[in-house]
Image (spheres, rainbow, N blue to C red):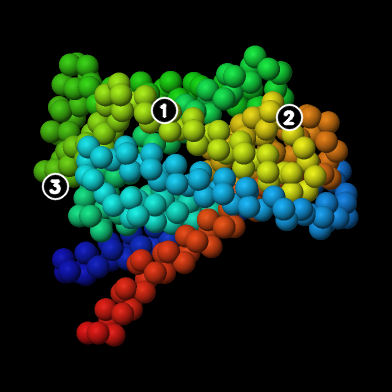
């Protein structure tokens, strides 16, 4: 068997393995959704749910879509600001990549959209995908920090459901571990840095070069958030996004007659963000509904209206951005190739 055949066989095996890996992730995601859908629907009168959803008050559509638009504008602006030390990107390009990324997250499990938006933007701007993905990961850290801030504020208002506080505690531990890991990665202690260099030197030359390149690019991306002023501004932007999300929650649920207090709005916002953090299920179907429904039940809403609220809030959160993301993806990355092919 000659060398070319071996190389071809290896590539074919990689493709097969990649396909199996994607299929496994998809099956896990679907399984997670099915489990939570079954749990959520127990004891719910679906006839009442349909009745509630059929009584939508369209007068609140304007503030709903204004809030939703502002949420994604803040997301895009925060990412644009975060990447300024790397490169001054066009805000339009950042916004498009952000929307496309969230669209793909609503289709694929395990946040495949975050990697895609890093890849697409990196290819457009001739910057390493690893560098841009590191800024995406760092941006997620600020989202988690904002969520923890809101959760701590709620501690002084009302006792939240047990599952929510358990989730917040786990999130605090994961957040602290993540911050420590990032700090150690950017400025490793001398002993750890020495051992890391030694371990890398043991690798084959081509793999050693790849690991070194990955490390350099990741550090460039993570270092984009350094500096007290930048950190403060990024935190303020993340908290601002949470505040606007609160308006989105309030007006979305008001569409079907659910009037919430400030404490209830903040609790629902915490619940929906905790649901989104679990990235296994595509579009977090089932997980999102369970989190929001149980939170509304905690505030004395019955199961049917609580599930109605969860469904309408979920639909507003994913359908508009998914449609816009799909259109932008076709316009920015699919259609230009087709036009180029025709011209050639």
- 14 vs 87, left or right, is right
Answer few, some or many: residues within 10 Å of disc 1's Cα (few below 14, many 20 plus, some between 14 and 19).
some
Name the one closer to the observer, 98 or 182. 98
As drawn, the label of residue 206 is 3
Residue 51's place in the image compared with 309, above or below, is below
Q: Residue at x 36, y 66 (%)?
A: 332
Element type at mark 1: helix
Answer few, some or many: residues within 10 Å of disc 2's Cα (few below 14, many 20 plus, some between 14 and 19).
few
Q: Position of residue 121 (x, y in %)?
A: 30, 54
Q: Position of residue 216 (x, y in %)?
A: 18, 37
As drawn, the label of residue 235 is 1
As drawn, the label of residue 188 is none
User: Mark 2 highlights which residue?
Assistant: 261
Q: For residue 275, say whether it is visible.
A: no
Q: CA distance from mark 3 to mark 2?
A: 59 Å
Q: Quadrant of the N terminus?
A: bottom left
Name the one closer to the observer, 191 or 102. 102
């Amino acid at each position: 068997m000659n060398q070319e055949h071996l190389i071809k066989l290896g590539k074919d095996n990689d493709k097969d393995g990649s396909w199996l890996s994607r299929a496994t992730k998809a099956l896990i995601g679907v399984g997670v959704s099915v489990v939570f859908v079954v749990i959520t629907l127990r004891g719910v009168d679906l006839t009442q749910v349909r009745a509630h959803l059929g009584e939508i008050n369209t007068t609140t559509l304007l503030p709903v879509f204004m809030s939703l638009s502002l949420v994604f504008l803040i997301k895009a602006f925060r990412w644009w600001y975060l990447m300024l030390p790397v490169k001054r990107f066009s805000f339009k390009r950042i916004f498009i990549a952000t929307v496309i990324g969230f669209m793909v997250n609503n289709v694929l499990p395990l946040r495949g959209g975050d990697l895609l938006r890093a890849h697409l933007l990196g290819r457009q701007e001739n910057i390493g995908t690893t560098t841009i993905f590191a800024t995406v990961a760092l941006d997620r850290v600020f989202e988690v920090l904002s969520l923890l801030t809101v959760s701590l504020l709620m501690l002084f208002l009302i006792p939240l459901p047990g599952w929510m506080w358990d989730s917040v505690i786990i999130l605090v531990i994961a957040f602290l571990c993540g911050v420590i890991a990032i700090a150690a990665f950017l400025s490793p202690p001398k002993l750890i840095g020495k051992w890391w260099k030694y371990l890398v030197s043991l690798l084959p030359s081509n793999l050693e070069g790849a690991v070194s390149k990955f490390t350099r690019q990741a550090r460039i991306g993570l270092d984009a958030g350094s500096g007290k002023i930048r950190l403060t501004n990024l935190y303020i932007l993340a908290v601002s996004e949470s505040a606007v999300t609160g308006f989105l929650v309030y007006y979305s649920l008001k569409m079907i007659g659910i009037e919430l207090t400030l404490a209830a709005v903040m609790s629902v916002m915490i619940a929906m963000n905790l649901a989104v953090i679990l990235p296994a299920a595509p579009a977090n179907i089932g997980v999102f509904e369970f989190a929001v429904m149980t939170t509304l039940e905690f505030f004395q809403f019955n199961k049917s209206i609580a599930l109605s609220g969860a469904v309408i809030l979920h639909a507003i959160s994913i359908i508009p951005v998914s449609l816009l993301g799909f259109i932008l993806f076709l316009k920015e990355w699919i259609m230009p190739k087709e036009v180029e092919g025709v011209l050639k």
